[in-house]
Image (cartoon, rainbow, N blue to C red):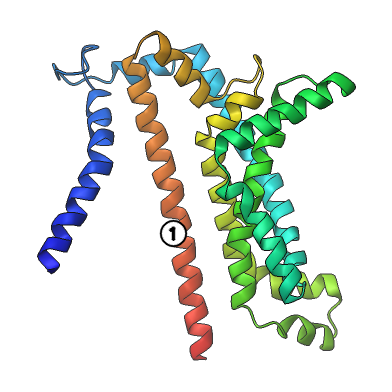
């Protein structure tokens, strides 16, 4: 039975990662062929960094991802603090509402945000561009921050905040010295998850972007409609590596937090 389980898992992993492996291999292909590997070269990576359209889109994507992640982390953390202080029934209702953007299909979120921006554009002279894209990314990033921070509140002793105040700390100092270190792994995980989702989002960005703020996924989509250049293989490889690094950092933070929590319980 164990052998069948291992074979099944191996087949699933092959199904998931063989296409990515092929993409990485052909990003080093000497020619533009997508079926025959004719030689090893770094030319497509060099050309990639001389492509002004891709570099501009990459810059826009990073700026949007960083700004949206920082704002979402702040908003999501404060929202989690408020939700944690609620009673059981309102807390459950709010958490269900918070999870709706995660469950909701991205196309529904994208179209609804587009219609909202169109409504305000007619009344406030709002143009589709950086601002609309940033608001859209914050909208779907905040629930992921809450989702990462709330478990840390659930793991935390609810009385340590009051104990810190009884020992002379002001409410702000008690939060900064006692609560924040306890929830910080969740805050960092929420930031990294928000950054990852913003980095590779296509559907919501497609409906809320403007001509002056194209993100990388939209630029790649536009390029593939004309022809599939090996530069796209090289770019996709770099994005894949970046996402893997972010996920490894996130997992390392969570493991360190879990180990610290386990040691604290033993003490």
- Front-most of residues 109 and 137: 109
The residue sitting at 50% across, 18% down in the picture is 219
The residue sitting at 60% across, 70% down in the picture is 152
Please indicate whether residue 44 sits to the left or right of residue 218 in the image. left
Residue 230 x, y percent position in the rendering: 31, 17
Residue at the outermost right position: 123
Task: Tell me, yes or no, if residue 131 can be seen here.
Answer: no
Within 10 Å of disc 1 (Cα), the crowding (few <14, some 14-19, many 20+) is few
- Front-most of residues 208 and 187: 208
The residue sitting at 53% across, 84% down in the picture is 264
Residue 127 x, y percent position in the rendering: 77, 19
- Against 207, is 69 above or below? below
Residue 114 x, y percent position in the rendering: 69, 27
The residue at which mark 1 appears reads as 251
- Against 101, is 123 above or below? above
The picture quadrant where one finds residue 19 is top left
- Against 212, is 255 above or below? below
Residue 104 x, y percent position in the rendering: 58, 45
The residue sitting at 62% across, 63% down in the picture is 149
């Amino acid at each position: 039975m164990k052998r069948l389980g291992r074979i099944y898992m191996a087949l699933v992993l092959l199904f998931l990662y063989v296409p990515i492996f092929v993409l990485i291999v052909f990003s080093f292909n000497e020619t533009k062929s997508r079926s025959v590997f004719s030689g090893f070269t770094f030319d497509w990576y060099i050309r990639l960094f001389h492509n002004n359209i891709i570099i501009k889109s990459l810059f826009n994507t990073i700026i949007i991802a960083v700004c949206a992640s920082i704002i979402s982390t702040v908003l999501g953390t404060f929202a989690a603090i408020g939700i944690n202080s609620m009673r059981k029934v309102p807390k459950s209702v709010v958490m269900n509402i918070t999870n709706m953007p995660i469950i909701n299909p991205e196309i529904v979120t994208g179209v609804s945000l587009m219609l909202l921006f169109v409504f305000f554009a007619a009344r406030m002279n709002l143009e589709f561009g950086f601002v609309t894209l940033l608001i859209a990314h914050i909208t779907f990033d905040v629930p992921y921050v809450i989702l990462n921070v709330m478990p840390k509140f659930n793991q935390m002793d609810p009385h340590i905040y009051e104990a810190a105040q009884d020992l002379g700390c002001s409410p702000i100092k008690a939060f900064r010295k006692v609560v924040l270190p306890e929830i910080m792994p969740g805050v960092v995980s929420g930031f990294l998850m928000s950054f990852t989702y913003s980095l590779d989002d296509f559907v919501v960005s497609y409906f809320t972007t403007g001509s002056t703020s194209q993100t990388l996924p939209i630029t790649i989509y536009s390029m593939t409609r004309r022809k599939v250049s090996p530069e796209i293989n090289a770019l996709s490889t770099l994005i894949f590596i970046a996402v893997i690094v972010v996920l490894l950092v996130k997992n390392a933070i969570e493991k360190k937090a879990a180990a610290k929590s386990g040691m604290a319980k033993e003490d």
